[in-house]
Image (cartoon, grey):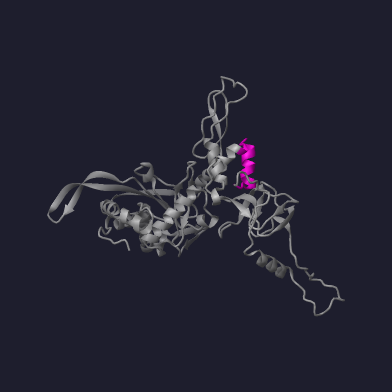
Amino acid sequence: MGESIHEATVLNWLKQPGDRIEADESLLEVATDKVDTEVPSTLTGIVREILVKEGDIAEIGKPICRIEVETDEPVALQNASPDESPDEEVVSPLEQEISIRQRMVGQIVEETRATPIQGRFYSPLVLNIAKEEGIGQAELDAIPGTGTEQRVTKQDILDYVKTRPQAPAPVQPNPSVKAPMPATNGLSTHGSSNGQDEIIQMDRMRKMIAERMVESKRTAPHVTSFVETDMTAVWKWREKAKRDFQTQYGEGLTFTPLLIEAVVRAIRDFPLINVQVDGDRILVKKAINIGMAVALPSGNLIVPVIHHADQYNLIGLTKKVNDLTRRARENKLKPDDLANGTYTVSNIGTFGNIMGTPIIVQPQVAIMAFGAIQKKPAVIETPDGDLLGIRHKMFISHSYDHRVVDGSLGGQFVKRVSDYLEGFDGERKLV
């Protein structure tokens, strides 16, 4: 589940005792503090016992169920009888497991218990959601699938449910009760009304985000510094280079990798911003792992991480940013994609915001928000005197943990990021 994940909540068992399971077939759905995901079986056999119930916590590395595996070869017991031939090989449980897994390599996995409908397969999880939501087979067939071979994924059917036209109710509703409004920003559509105010239940992700934000404010005394940056050189270079970049590398060139590049350079200059607090100790992180906030279609935010961001050039950084953003919005991130961030950035300018006071992602000690780039009249200093001109300006907001980051370090760091952006080489080559 990822090196920083120590436990997960079992949401739903897709197989029950007595059911057959194939290697790589989804066995259960779990939720961690970072992502919901389906867990595939590593074995082929019959599920005999479930050890962790739905809703309970499963510790990483401990058994969650027992599967009776299938093998065509006789297996010798470790405690062989005394009259057994001394030349007879005794196979240990570990060797048994290795032998079984080796035979599985290259096996074509057939998804049992999935229902083929007009040539397309549906996982048990998708079928369960369809059943709960009253989606018939014909309607299910019409849902566009983003999975392999156009299969409908969990996110596909959940997105469909959110926008699905509701059938008229068989019973005339009470006119004094307001109909629930469509849910946004992580709020469930399962609401109620008392005649005046509508009550909408938060979904699990929204509750988790709320808990994390309160925990961060409770843990770290937040201070925010602001700098206005002249982005004219960066703006002009991107306008000139983005078409060639798309042609040569097949990727869209946004401002985000350029901003992250400046942050990485500043972290090298001020390594004490790339730290974590452990009691009365300060842990200086050697790896520069940049988290970037991504807005999901549901309105929630998720923060995938670019590990070792200092080891990428601009081309690699752009590809990584685009890949993580795309997979975040398609609900295809893996737990490792969200683990071990050391510093986070948020491009709030995409929403038209000019500045903000972002909340630190614990256990990090700082976060930076980049505002919208706006054309403004500005004083331009030249050897011949000051001139007035139109420049592309942007506010940078830097929130930091005042327990370990003083105003001097926090202010110098955001200013250094600004200096790198203002000093951007307008003649820079793509390679």
Asked whether, in this view, residue 112 is left or right of residue 429, the answer is right
Q: Nearer the viewer, residue 218 or 253?
A: 253
Q: Is residue 132 magenta?
A: yes
* Residue depicted at x 25% and y 60%: 427
Task: Let me know if residue 365 appears in the view.
Answer: no
From the top left corner, tell me how far across and down residue 334 is, in percent: 54, 55
* Vertical position of residue 129 compared to residue 361: above or below: above
Where's the C terminus, which quadrant?
bottom left
* Residue 420 location (% of width, % of height): 30, 58
Q: Residue furthest top?
A: 175
Q: Which residue occupies the foreground of this view, 296 or 412?
A: 296
Residue 269 shows in this picture: yes
Front in this rendered view, residue 258 or 159: 159
Above or below, 99 against 192 in this view is below
* Numbered marks: total: 0
Q: Is residue 33 magenta?
A: no
Residue placed furthest toward the left? 384
Q: Which of the image's four quarters has the N terminus?
A: bottom right
Measured as percent of width and height from the top left, residue 270 is found at 37, 61
User: Which residue is located at x 18 percent, y 53 percent?
Assistant: 381
Q: Is residue 376 left or right of residue 259?
A: left
Q: Is residue 422 above or below residue 178?
A: below
In the rendered structure, the answer to whether residue 18 lies left or right of residue 220 reads: right
Identify the residue at image location x=27%, y=55%. 422
Residue range corresponding to the magenta coloring: 120-137
Residue occupying the far bottom of the picture: 87
Q: Position of residue 322 (x, y in %)?
A: 42, 53
